[in-house]
């Protein structure tokens, strides 16, 4: 039995004040859920958001981090700094891969650093439209998963979450059909089994991301290998996001 995770990636949206306001609206709306709820605000808003959600069932995390402990990396935040305030971190989001030179190698370094610092990383993977049309989806997923988790063993996988986010579905309004998403999720679980054994594969949560909204969460969550959602646009408004969190199968 895998507890679903519904996570909101706020990207570069919301000032500190706006973030706090939204979280205050969200708290009562999701207070009865048994799902895990995680919000990833911008760096500045992370600590104020953590202070705001004290005593609630919402967690707050960061959208990225560097892999080095410390050093001359202007503008970066280290895993040690992240670990001072939260355990949740997104690694390898496609926007970081696309705009900030994130590679499979840096993703792997960040994943290793996250585990070394006791964090719970969500490893984001997914194919472009071009790759899907060239029928390379499963090959890309194998490469991104294998290199992202290079050097991992079953023990290190305990706090790892995987997010499958087809790039063509992110922020486009085009959601993968439940069958398309399930096919890739089942494949990811099979790869996890190959790499770490059946028990780890069965325990690892695999989230779907890409234009998830209240209208499609139920059908996605009805699929065997979809264990939650990583949600961008539809996480920005508490009333919409809470409808996703409180989905009923
Ligand atoms: C995301 O950025 O992780 C995402 C899935 O965005 P959206 O829900 O807006 O497609």
Image: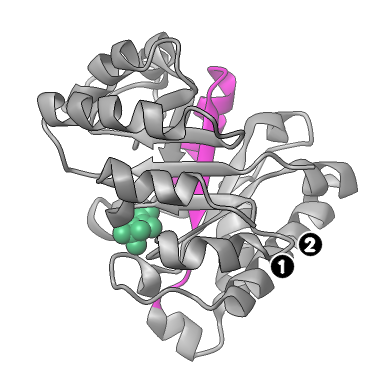
Relative placement, left or right, of 112 versus 12 is right
Give the colouring mode of the picture.
Answer: one colour
The answer to whether the residue labelled 2 contacts the one labelled 1, judged by CB atoms less than 8 Å apart, is yes
- Please state the horizontal and vertical placement of residue 193, each as a whole percent of the image: 82, 54
Say if residue 106 shows up in the picture: no
The location of residue 151, given as percent across then percent down, is 67, 39
Q: Is residue 133 above or below residue 101?
A: below
Instruction: State the count of labels.
Output: 2
Give above or below for 19 relative to 149. above
Q: Residue furthest bottom?
A: 134
Q: Which residue is denoted by mark 1 in the rendering?
A: 187
Query: Where is residue 113 drawn, in percent x and y?
Result: 51, 27
Q: Which residue is mark 2?
A: 190
- Say which of 77 and 48 sits in front: 48
The magenta segment is 106-128
> Residue at the location (66% across, 70% down)?
182
Residue 154, can we see it?
yes
Query: Which residue appears farthest toward the right when viewing the image?
Result: 198
User: In which quadrant is the C terminus drawn?
Assistant: bottom right
Residue at the spot x=79%, y=36% of the render?
154
* Circle on res. 96: none
Residue 118 painted magenta:
yes
Element type at mark 1:
helix
Which image quarter is the N terminus in?
A: top right
Query: Which quarter is ligand 1 in?
Result: bottom left
């Amino acid at each position: 039995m895998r507890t679903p995770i519904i996570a909101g990636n706020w990207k570069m949206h919301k000032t500190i004040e706006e973030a706090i306001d939204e979280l205050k609206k969200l708290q009562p709306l999701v207070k009865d859920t048994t799902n895990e709820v995680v919000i990833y605000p911008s760096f500045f808003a992370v600590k104020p958001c953590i202070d705001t959600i004290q005593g609630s069932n919402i967690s707050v995390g960061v959208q990225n981090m560097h892999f080095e402990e410390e050093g001359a990396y202007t503008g970066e935040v280290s895993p040690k700094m992240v670990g001072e305030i939260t355990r949740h971190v997104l690694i390898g989001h496609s926007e970081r891969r696309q705009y900030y030179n994130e590679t499979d190698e840096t993703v792997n370094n960040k994943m290793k650093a996250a585990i070394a610092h006791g964090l719970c990383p969500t490893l984001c993977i997914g194919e472009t439209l071009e790759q899907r049309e060239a029928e390379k989806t499963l090959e890309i997923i194998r490469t991104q998963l294998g290199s992202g988790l290079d050097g991992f063993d079953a023990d290190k996988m305990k706090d790892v979450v995987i997010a499958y986010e087809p790039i063509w579905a992110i922020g486009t309004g085009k959601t993968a059909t439940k069958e398309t998403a399930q096919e890739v999720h089942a494949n990811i679980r099979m790869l996890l089994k190959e790499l770490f054994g059946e028990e780890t594969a069965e325990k690892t949560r695999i989230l779907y991301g890409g234009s998830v909204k209240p209208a499609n969460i139920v059908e996605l969550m009805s699929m065997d290998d979809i264990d939650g959602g990583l949600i961008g646009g539809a996480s920005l408004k508490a009333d919409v996001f809470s409808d996703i969190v409180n989905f009923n199968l």
